[in-house]
Structures are given as C-alpha cells and as structure tokens.
Amino acid sequence: MKKRSLALFFAFVAALVFAPANPALAAPAIGSAAPDFQLNDSDGQSRSLSEFKGKYVVLEWTNPQCPFVVKHYKSGNMPSLQKWAKEKSVVWLTIDSSAPGAEGYLSEADAKKMRASNYAAPTALLLDPDGKVGQLYGAKTTPHMFIIDPQGKLLYAGAIDSIRSANIDDIAKATNYVKVGLEEAMAGKPLTTPTSQAYGCSVKYARK
C-alpha cells in the first residue's frame, strides 16, 4: 500500500512538472508575425524585438532554479548552443517571466550578477516580471523555445529537443530542434519540425 501511495505521489509530481502552466496560453501561429515587445535587460537597458529585424532571433524562456533548465546549462548544452548561434549572427534573447516572490524570479541586480558570473552567452537576458511577454507568446515551460526569421515571422515554437527528460545523459541522444531548425532555415529549407510540445517546469507567472 505504501509503495502504491509513493508511486501515485511521484506520478502527480511528474504531471505538475510536465503540464503546461496555463492551457489557455497559446503561441502565435507558425508563419505569423512574431509579436513585438519591449523589456529591460540585466543592465536596465530597454530592448525590443524590432531592433533585431533582419536577423534570426531565438527566444528562450528560463528559470535558473528549474531542474530542466539546470540540465541544459550544467551540461554546457545551452551555452554551447548560444555561442554557436552567435557565430552564425543569430540573436539570442533569454527571458525570465517568473513573478516577484516566485521560483526563478530575478531582480535586475540578480540578473546582472548572474549574467556576469554565468557561463551563459545570450545576446541579452530580459526581465518580464509581470509575465506579459511570456503570455503574449504562450510560453508555458522553462525552457520554451521560439525561432523568428529575419522578416519577423515565427518559424518554430516548442521544446529545445526531442527527449522530455531532466537527465543530462539524454542530451546526446536527443534531436536539438533549435539547432536543426536554424540550420534548415539558414539553408533556405522548410523546418522539418516547426512545432513540438515544450517540456520542463511551468512558467511561474503572477497569480491573478
């Protein structure tokens, strides 16, 4: 009986982790214009999506306390991907939509410190404490990834890769949808996988 109770408990926890934060959130349609936005970065500078028009842009939703995010950073997978993208002149915007007081929330000072000490290499770390931009894009999990083309159209929305796991060992076995998608787009090819189901921790939006 005790084993059955533990099994049910872990199944419940897994459901919470993998479930979308809010089923009502819906990402813009693939092929549609990616919504413009303005957010402050870790240096307090206002940044907008429109300032990067003419370049490929990756949006990455993050929560530094989420084990799925930790998996991709601790392994070096996310930083390596960010550096590879930078070499290809791709803009990488990491966005934290955790509400004040919630898991993963970063103040400007915290973000600046993290950016200075972390081995991550995004173009900018953007703060979205009221969650407006996250909800505009239908970001449900951390990580949740989006690719935008130089014309401002949404090319990809979904998971970073094909294996829904917090296990570092699974990274090498997975298809990295973001890297493959960028390679295909830059080669003038349609994306093999334009959408996938994002996995990870739910985005910790402010409660209404």
Image (spheres, helix red, strand yellow):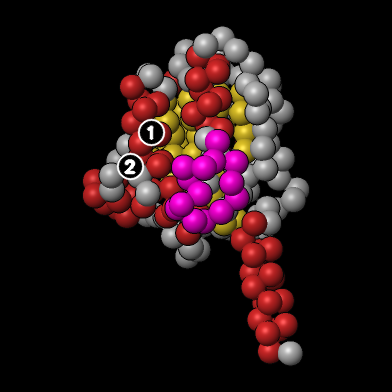
* Crowd around label 2: few <14 · some 14–19 · many ≥20 (10 Å): many
Identify the image quadrant of residue 196: top right
Residue 176: % across, % down: 52, 35
Q: Residue at x 43, y 48 (%)?
A: 72
Residue 114: % across, % down: 30, 51
Q: Which residue is mark 2?
A: 120
Q: Given contact means CB atoms under 8 Å apart, are the residues at marks 1 and 2 in contact?
A: yes
Q: Residue lying at the far front in this picture: please name it.
A: 173
Where 155 sits versus 142, above or below?
Answer: above
Q: Quadrant of the C terminus?
A: bottom right
Residue 58: % across, % down: 49, 30
Where 144 sits versus 2, above or below?
Answer: above
| Residue 203 in view | no
Q: Nearer the viewer, residue 164 or 97?
A: 164
Asked if residue 5 lies left or right of residue 162, the reply is right
Which numbered dot is residue 82? Answer: 1
Amino acid type, label 2 = Ala
Residue extent of the magenta highlight: 162-175
The kind of secondary structure element at disc 2 is loop
